[in-house]
Image (tube, grey):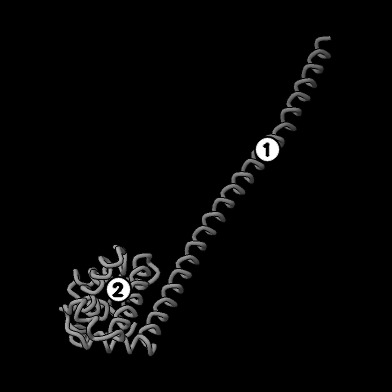
Amino acid sequence: MRDKRTSVAERRAVKGGSRRIRGEPTNAVAMSWEAVTALGTAFTALVIVATAVVGLGQLNVIRRQRQDSAAVELVRSLQDDGFIRAYNLVFSLPAGITATDLRDLGTSYVDAGVILGFRFEMLGVLVFKGVIPFAIVEDLAGGLVLGAWKRLEDSVRATRRDKHWPGYLEWFQWLAEQFERRGRLDLTPAFERITHWNQP
């Protein structure tokens, strides 16, 4: 009897052990699914980060393309016939000319001042909004803007008083003052300032 009870107990122990052994793969499968889920989450986060980086790069490219296009349009605007005629008339005047003296010269000079003024007004807004980089405008038209303002300032201020329009050509003045603070008219010319240059 004692041997029989011993054998029964042993068989039960073996069965219990086998149940524990069969349970171990179930835990391993659960752990493997957790690992897969973690890897999937990490991959998704990596894709989101990569997409954001690519998106930022595309935005920078678009911004540069927009600035390049605006610079090209600026060059074109400085070359049309209307601008050139206005430039020739305004820059034939002495700096500091009064509004009265300008009007006495006739409507052609007054109109030329208006043409330059509004052209540089739009340019000032584009610079302030960051559409065109300030450095490009300074190199292309800094002297023109400041020279025009020195000849049209009194006329602009008179128009503001006479028409009760304090914001008349405000961005033209703002842009000219930026160049004046940087000493644009006293700047050494590029052909003297840049004697050794390597093409980028």
Percent x, y of residue 136: 32, 76
> Is residue 198 among what the camera can see?
no
Q: Classify residue 140 by image quadrant.
A: bottom left
Instruction: Determine whether, in the image, residue 191 is placed left or right of residue 76.
Output: left
The earlier-in-sequence mark between 1 and 2 is 1
Q: On the image, numbered disc 1 is attached to which residue?
A: 30
Quarter holding the N terminus is: top right
> Is residue 159 among what the camera can see?
yes
Residue at (48, 70) in percent of width and height: 62
Q: Which mark is residue 177?
A: none
What's under tag 1, amino acid-wise?
Ala
Q: Classify residue 72 by image quadrant.
A: bottom left
Please tell me how crowded label 2 is: few (under 14), some (14-19), or many (20+) other residues with Cα within 10 Å.
few
Camera-side mark, 1 or 2:
2
Residue at (35, 77) in percent of width and height: 119
SS at circle 1: helix
Percent x, y of residue 138: 28, 76
What's under tag 2, amino acid-wise?
Ala
Residue at (21, 76) in percent of width and height: 99
Q: On the image, numbered disc 2 is attached to which residue?
A: 135
SS at circle 2: helix
Looking at the image, is 159 positioned above or below residue 104? above
Of residues 6 and 31, the one nearer the viewer is 31
The span from disc 1 to disc 2 (Cα, nearest Å) is 62 Å
